[in-house]
Image (spheres, rainbow, N blue to C red):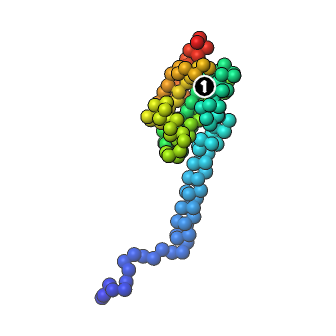
Amino acid sequence: MSMIGRSRVTPRRRGETINHVVAWLVAGAATLVAWKAFSPESTHADWHVTLDDGFDASTTSGRPMLVLYTADWCPACKQLEAEVLEDPDVADLLEQRFETVLIDLTDRAGPNTAVAQHYEVRSIPAVHVYDASGELVDDRIGVGRAAEYYAWLRKCASKSDRR
């Protein structure tokens, strides 16, 4: 018996093919929803997007300025945002005690890349804290636990108050 013209692959039934297509569509939609939910624009809509705006607000309010360097394509950045910055204690502290700035490095050729290079950001996520006069108080790179960040932020706010 010749195998020419015959396939060893069993054809799928129509219902199986439709189920696979539906599963791929659902997975794609879920990925899109998750990407939009954790994008810097939606997570930090009330943050300043330029250092100049942040420095002006910090000078006016007398509060320290926290600068977050992040990107959509950075898994550690997403983790920091989801596990640390969205923590209720950390979020409340940031809202009450800091002017916040998000420097989005998603476009590697965009203008924020020059800003990051000027401030010697070599890895993201990076967080810098400045006092109201523009002096660097402290910085951190990477992800940590929310409780660690909360304690660090309180310490930065206290250092800034003493200057």
Q: Nearer the viewer, residue 36 or 7?
A: 36
Q: Is residue 142 visible?
A: no
Give the residue drawn at x 60%, y 25%. 65
Asked if residue 4 lies left or right of residue 155, the reply is: left
Give the residue drawn at x 53%, y 21%. 136
Residue count near mark 1 (Cα–Cα under 10 Å), binned few <14, some 14–19, many ≥20: many
The outermost residue toward the top is: 162
* Residue 107 against residue 146 in the figure, above or below: below
Q: Nearer the viewer, residue 155 or 144?
A: 155
Helix, strand or loop at mark 1: strand
Q: Quadrant of the C terminus?
A: top right
On the image, numbered disc 1 is attached to which residue? 65
Q: Is residue 162 visible?
A: yes
Asked if residue 2 lies left or right of residue 28, the reply is: left
Q: Position of residue 51 (x, y in %)?
A: 59, 32
The outermost residue toward the bottom is: 1
Q: Position of residue 56 (x, y in %)?
A: 66, 27
Q: Quadrant of the N terminus?
A: bottom left
The outermost residue toward the left is: 1
| Amino acid type indicated by mark 1 | Met
Asked if residue 7 lies left or right of residue 108, the reply is: left
Q: Position of residue 125 (x, y in %)?
A: 49, 35
